[in-house]
Image (tube, helix red, strand yellow):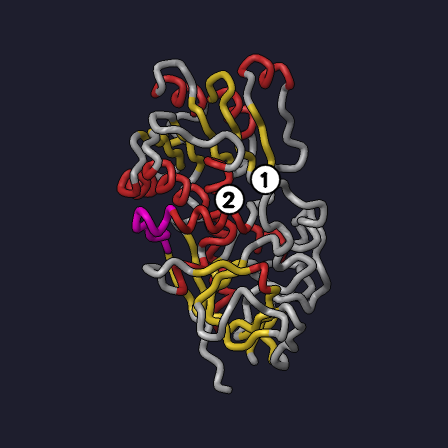
Amino acid sequence: MLAYEIGERDNVDSWRAVERPVPTLRDTQVLIAVHAVSLNFRDVLLATKSYGFPVAGPHIIPCSDGAGVVIATGSGVTRWKVGERVVGTFVESWIGGRQPHDSFETQRCGLLDGMLAQMVVVDQNGLVAIPEHLDFAEAATLPVAGVTAWNALFGLKPLLPGETVLTLGTGGVATFAIQFARAAGAHVISTSSSDAKLEQARVLGADDTINYRTHPDWQLEARRLTGGRGVDHVIDIGGKGTTARSVASVRPGGVVSLLGGMPGERIDPMALLKTSAILRGMNVGSREMFEAMNAAITLHGLHPVISRTYAFEDAKAALRDLTKGEHVGKIVINVPAISR
């Protein structure tokens, strides 16, 4: 079968196309014919040795997010049947409840293989069903960006109708957050350095927008837009200087969900005390969250935002495209069917 390996991780061109044997199934594993894979900024960090969590050697398959069809099951599999459409979870061991102690060791494309191959094996507990109205490309965008947005808004302090959500940027997590917040009856403020991207955010459902080049102190503009109260939830992607501004933008008891971070970034403890803000880091979310999110996606008929799709042989070009930051939503790689 065709696959990619992560390589030596010395630059964004380190991925290498290879041929590998069909994976062998263990009792509780499922063999998936992958149809589509989506990229996350995490893939750039992994390719450049900038990811701060455990990563296996150069032969690991990249990309955590993929969707496909069950084509074989191990003897002990009870959750899935051949022919069912499935998408993998990000943290295979996190079924529900509190984040497990081994969650950083069971991330897909960490110590476990990722999804950028014609076939992959996944434990039966590391899969969820694809919502019926979504195609494989749309489903492939869900595991990291979708579940992260869902966890940020509903995992700790659930978003309520009438509350305000501030999203930073217009990448995959932000576009999902806009859609989920609007479906929940919330007011959405989106930021970007591009007026064109902000217009797309409005089409998705953003009520107000802030160009952070025009308003470099965008936390003040967010407060102005909320009548001085501040926002209830911030989806912070962890850019340079964003965390302090995110904390300054929230109302008392507001939640800042931190999805990444710049080395050396600092936050003044007094800023947290003055706002009573909750600053939380997240490792995406659980399978239980994924299933709840899929139920909401089905109920509201939501469709993920896909910016561009690439052929399998152009996977490295897709990763380079991701580094440019010109997209809105997600970048997807189509995986060719395998002849068996």
Residue linked to disc 1 = 282
Is 43 inside the magenta-drawn segment?
no
The number of numbered discs placed on residues in the rendered structure image is 2
- For disc 2, the marked residue is 148
The magenta region covers 296-306
Question: In terms of image quadrants, where is residue 75?
Answer: bottom right
The relative height of residue 121 versus residue 300 in the rendered view (above or below) is: below
Q: Is residue 65 above or below residue 85?
A: above
Q: Residue furthest bottom?
A: 340
Q: CB atoms at circles 1 and 2 under 8 Å apart?
A: yes
Secondary structure beneath dot 1 equals loop
Amino acid type of the residue that numbered disc 2 sits on in the rendered structure? Thr
Q: Which is nearer the eye, 197 or 229?
A: 229
Residue 215 location, quadrant? top left
Quarter of the picture holding the N terminus:
bottom right
What's the amino acid at mark 1? Met
Q: Position of residue 264 (x, y in %)?
A: 67, 32
- Is residue 201 placed above or below 314 in the rendered structure? above
Query: In the image, residue 315 lies at what x, y percent?
Result: 50, 67
Q: Earlier in the sequence, mark 1 or mark 2?
A: 2
